[in-house]
């Protein structure tokens, strides 16, 4: 979901940038990559993520490859590499 205004202010994020991870399903690609609930996803492979649709599109385009996801977790920026499995 889009980043809430209070969190955006706390993290000093530009308006319209980032989505908040609301839930991680056990054994999902996101869980295996180390993403956690309340992480804020800022970009994938350097492309800004402004909406959940941006993230879904980046994941679909990366099928069968790995992507670098820039996040903020507990006010600390991090980069996580995620391997997106090919569709069956």
Image (tube, rainbow, N blue to C red):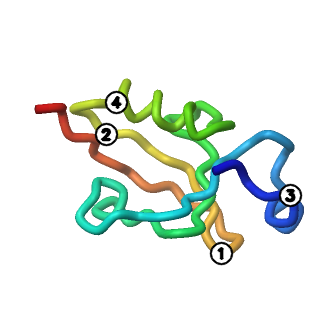
Whether tag 3 and tag 1 are in contact, CB under 8 A, the answer is no
Q: Using the rendered view, name the quadrant where residue 20 is placed.
A: bottom right
Neighbourhood count class around disc 4 (C-alpha, 10 Å): few under 14, some 14–19, many 20 upward = some
Q: Which residue is mark 3?
A: 5
Q: CA distance from mark 2 to mark 4?
A: 7 Å
Asked if residue 87 lies left or right of residue 38, the reply is left
Asked if residue 48 lies left or right of residue 70, the reply is right
Name the residue: 28% across, 41% down: 84
74 to 13, vertically: above or below? below
Q: Residue furthest left?
A: 88
Q: Nearer the viewer, mark 4 or mark 3?
A: 3
49 to 33, vertically: above or below? above
Neighbourhood count class around disc 2 (C-alpha, 10 Å): few under 14, some 14–19, many 20 upward = some
Q: Which residue is mark 4?
A: 62
Whether tag 2 and tag 4 are in contact, CB under 8 A, the answer is yes
Q: Earlier in the sequence, mark 4 or mark 3?
A: 3
Q: CA distance from mark 4 to mark 3?
A: 30 Å
Q: Which residue is mark 1?
A: 74
Q: Nearer the viewer, residue 25 or 65?
A: 25
Q: Earlier in the sequence, mark 2 or mark 1?
A: 2
The disc at residue 63 is none
Name the residue: 64% across, 34% down: 48
Name the residue: 52% across, 37% down: 55
Q: Which residue is mark 2?
A: 66
């Amino acid at each position: 979901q889009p980043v809430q205004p209070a969190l955006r202010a706390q993290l000093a994020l530009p308006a319209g940038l980032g989505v908040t991870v609301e839930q991680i399903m056990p054994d999902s690609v996101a869980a295996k990559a180390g993403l956690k609930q309340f992480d804020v996803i800022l970009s994938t492979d350097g492309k800004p993520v402004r909406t959940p649709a941006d993230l879904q599109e980046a994941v679909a385009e990366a099928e069968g490859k790995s992507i670098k996801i820039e996040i903020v977790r507990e006010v600390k920026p991090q980069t996580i590499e995620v391997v997106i499995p090919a569709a069956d």
